[in-house]
Image (cartoon, rainbow, N blue to C red):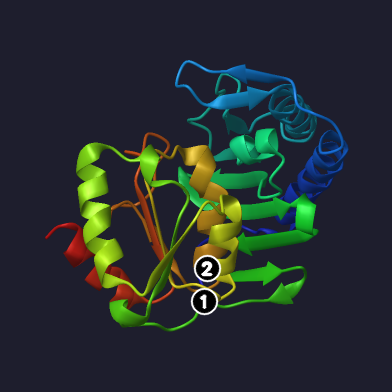
Amino acid sequence: MMSDLPPHAEFLSFAEKLADRSRSMLLDASQRAPDVEIKQDASFVTATDKAVEVALREMIQDTYPDHGILGEEFENTNTDAEFVWVLDPIDGTAALVAGIPVYGSLIGLAWNGAPFVGVIEHPMTSDRWVGVAGSFARFNGNPIRVRSCASMATAYATCSNRDFMSASEQAKFDRVREQVQYVQYGGSCYSYGVLASGRVDLALDGGLDAFDIYAPAAVITGAGGLVTDWNGDALSFDMNGNVLAAGDKALMEKTMNVLHG
C-alpha cells in the first residue's frame, strides 16, 4: 500500500461517473457507422472521440476547475497542477472504425505527474477495471491481482500493434517475442485490463502517449504489477512512447535484459 497517496475515494467515484458518461456515448455510437477523419499522424479520429472528450472535459471543469486536463483530441490545460486528468476518449479508434468491438475509454488521474487513479471502461463487453496506484484494483466490482510468472518461456504477452514501434524498437521487441510462449495482438486497452486480472503476464507497446497508459498503469500497479518504459523509467507526460508492463517483478527484469540484449 502506498500510504503517502492522497485520499482517493472521491476521485475514484468521480472517475466512474466519467466512465458512465463515456459508456453511454460509446454504446450509442456503436449503433451507426462513424464519421472518420485522418489525423496528421495518420491515425483515425471520429466525431465520437471528440464528443466524448468534450463531455468529460466539461464534467471535470465543472467539478474540479483547478485540476489540469491532458487529453488526446484537444489542447492540454494546466498540466503543472497537482492533479491532472488524463483522458483517452476512445482507445482503439481503428477497431471502432472497423466495427470490431475492442475499444474503450481510459480515464486517469495523475498526482504530481504520476499515475494515481485509473478506469479502463470497456462498454462493448460491459467490463470495467478501476484501480488506485499501488493500493488496489477491481474488475466489475471484484478485487483482482496480477499473477506470478517468473519464466519468459511460459509468459503470455500482449502487444497492441508492432507497427506502432520504430525500427529499433521492433528489433528489440522481436527478441522478446522469440523468448515468450505467445504474443496476443490487437487487444487495445483490454489487454492491460486482463494483465491486471492475472490472465496474461506481460505487455509491450510502442508509440503510446500518456493518455494511452496512465489509467491502465494505475489499475495494473493497484493489482500488484509494474509499468515503466523499456528502460525501466517511470511514466511521464512527455514519455518516450514505449511501455513495458508485467505482473511479476522477476519477469519484468528478465524482459528488460532481453530488450537490451
Residue pictured at 52% horizontal, 68% vertical: 195
* Residue 145: % across, % down: 56, 78
Q: Would you say residue 13 is visible in this rendering?
A: no
Q: Would you say residue 155 is visible in this rendering?
A: yes
* Residue 246: % across, % down: 40, 68
Circle 1: residue type: Val
Circle 2: residue type: Leu
Residue pictured at 77% horizontal, 43% vertical: 18
1 and 2 marks in contact (CB < 8 Å) = yes
Q: Secondary structure at mark 1?
A: loop
**Disc 1: CA contacts within 10 A as few (<14), some (14-19) or many (>=20):** many
Q: Is residue 224 left or right of residue 177?
A: right
Name the mark nearer the viewer: 1 or 2.
Answer: 2
Residue 113 is marked as: none
Residue named by callout 1: 146
Residue 195 is marked as: 2
Figure label count: 2
Residue pictured at 57% horizontal, 29% vertical: 72
Query: Which residue appears farthest toward the left when viewing the image?
Result: 261
Residue pictured at 32% horizontal, 72% vertical: 180
In-front residue for pair 246/46: 46
Q: Is residue 239 left or right of residue 24?
A: left
* Residue 239: % across, % down: 36, 39
Vertical order, 252 against 7 (above or below): below
Quarter holding the C terminus is: bottom left
Vertical order, 247 against 204 (above or below): below
Q: Residue 166: which quarter of the image?
A: top left
**Disc 2: CA contacts within 10 A as few (<14), some (14-19) or many (>=20):** many
| Mark 1 or mark 2, earlier in chain | 1
Vertical order, 256 against 144 (above or below): above
Q: Secondary structure at mark 2?
A: helix
* Residue 174: % across, % down: 25, 56
